[in-house]
Image: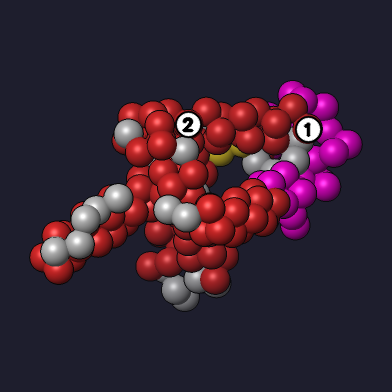
């Protein structure tokens, strides 16, 4: 890849990171209601360590259209699913080592663990294992889309007789 493309990619990645941090730590989900609570109160009211508890609740809400507004569960599920999807494009293109799926996945897991821990310590947002699951699933899908794109481009270049970089 040429240097100009890499520079543009870094700028866009930087903007994405700002949006990511805003959404996870400073946005309207930032938990202003939690700031006056003790850590114990915060944990009791906003921490979910039960896998699929929130996801299954939201799916139930979606199918129970008579009693609930579908906007909230669809938005929560969708945003958490797509939040790390762009990492599938940025990380493998900017860091050669992260073209390996295990390294890529480990990096995203560490990043999310850090964000969730900061949310817990600062009482900003909610510490939810389901957010973690959806974020990681989005990161995996993003990586798979990147991988598929690379294979299609590589195959296309081979068919046209061009060399692959």
Q: Residue at x 32, y 34 (%)?
A: 100
* x and y percentages locating residue 137 in the rendered image: 38, 46
Gap in Å between the C-alphas at discs 2 and 1?
Answer: 22 Å
**How many neighbours does mark 1 have within 10 angstroms: few (below 14), some (14-19), or many (20 or more)?**
some
Q: Nearer the viewer, residue 60 or 128?
A: 128
* x and y percentages locating residue 150 in the rendered image: 28, 55
The answer to whether 85 is drawn above or below residue 45 in the figure is below
* x and y percentages locating residue 91 in the rendered image: 47, 43
Question: Which colouring convention does the figure follow?
Answer: secondary structure
What residue is disc 1 on? 122
What residue is disc 2 on? 107
Judge whether residue 134 can be spotted in this image.
no
First in sequence: mark 2 vs mark 1: 2
The answer to whether 85 is drawn above or below residue 74 in the figure is above
Q: Residue at x 65, y 41 (%)?
A: 126
Q: Residue at x 70, y 31 (%)?
A: 118
Per the image, is 36 magenta?
Answer: yes
State left or right for residue 47 relative to residue 57. Answer: right
Per the image, is 50 magenta?
Answer: no
Q: Nearer the viewer, residue 87 or 27?
A: 87
**How many neighbours does mark 2 have within 10 angstroms: few (below 14), some (14-19), or many (20 or more)?**
some
Mark 2 element type: helix
Q: Nearer the viewer, residue 53 or 147?
A: 147
* x and y percentages locating residue 160 in the rendered image: 14, 68
Residues shaded magenta: 20-45
The main secondary structure of the magenta stretch is helix
Q: Nearer the viewer, residue 114 or 130?
A: 114
Quarter of the image for residue 157 reads: bottom left
Q: Which residue of the protein is positioned furthest toward the top in this rendering?
A: 40
């Amino acid at each position: 890849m040429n240097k100009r493309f890499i520079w543009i990619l870094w700028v866009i990645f930087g903007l994405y990171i700002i949006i990511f941090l805003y959404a996870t730590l400073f946005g309207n989900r930032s938990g202003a209601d939690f700031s006056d609570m003790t850590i114990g109160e915060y944990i009791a009211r906003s921490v979910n360590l039960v896998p699929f508890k929130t996801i299954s609740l939201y799916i139930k809400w979606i199918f129970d259209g008579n009693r609930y507004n579908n906007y909230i569960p669809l938005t929560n599920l969708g945003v958490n699913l797509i939040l790390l999807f762009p990492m599938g494009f940025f990380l493998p293109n900017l860091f050669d080592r992260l073209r390996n799926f295990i390294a890529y996945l480990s990096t995203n897991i560490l990043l999310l663990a850090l964000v969730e821990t900061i949310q817990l310590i600062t009482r900003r947002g909610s510490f939810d294992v389901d957010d973690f699951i959806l974020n990681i699933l989005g990161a995996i899908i993003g990586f798979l889309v990147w991988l598929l794109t690379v294979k299609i481009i590589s195959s296309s270049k081979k068919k046209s007789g061009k060399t692959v970089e």
